Image (cartoon, grey):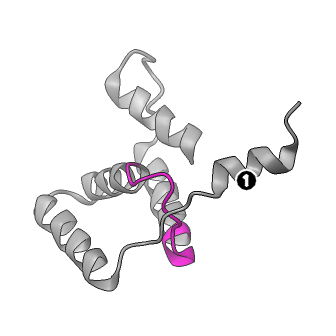
Amino acid sequence: DVKAGSVAKSLFADTKTWFTEDEEKEEVCRFLTENSGKTIWYLMKNFLDYVFRLENRMVWPEELVTFTAKVYNCWRIHLADPIDNPDDKFTQEFLRYYIIG
């Protein structure tokens, strides 16, 4: 019989610190270079994809959590109503972010 405390400890004990200032700067520059010239909609989508692919043990700074939520809400508003075809790749991606978010 597993106790709740030991489960929480095993799930959250092995965290990883956020990037150093130089690593964060490098990541931001890489993201901006890779997404240069794209529309705001694609920038938002690619930003969400990037942050959700970060190592899941990494502890996010509070400002990033708030900013990501704002980007996600704005991205959803721009989508209007994408749930037309559940087999569509775009719809599946939207639902993935909706579930994660």
**Dividing the picture into quarters, in which one does residue 71 lie?**
bottom left
Residue closer to the observer: 7 or 68: 7
Q: Quadrant of the N terminus?
A: top right
The answer to whether 60 is drawn above or below residue 76 in the figure is below
Which is nearer the eye, 34 or 6? 6
Residue 45 sits above or below residue 20 on the image: above
Magenta span main SS: loop
Q: In this picture, which residue range is highlighted in magenta?
A: 53-65
Q: Is residue 55 magenta?
A: yes
How many discs mark residues in the rendered view? 1
Residue 65 location, x and y as percent?
54, 67
> What amino acid is found at the position of numbered circle 1 in the picture?
Lys
Q: Nearer the viewer, residue 81 or 27?
A: 27
Q: Position of residue 23 (x, y in %)?
A: 27, 76
Residue at (11% x, 66% y) in the render: 33
Category of crowding for the residue at label 1, using alpha-carbon neighbours closer than 10 angstroms: few (below 14), some (14–19), many (at least 20):
few
Relative side of 27 to 94, left or right: left
Q: Is residue 88 above or below residue 48?
A: above
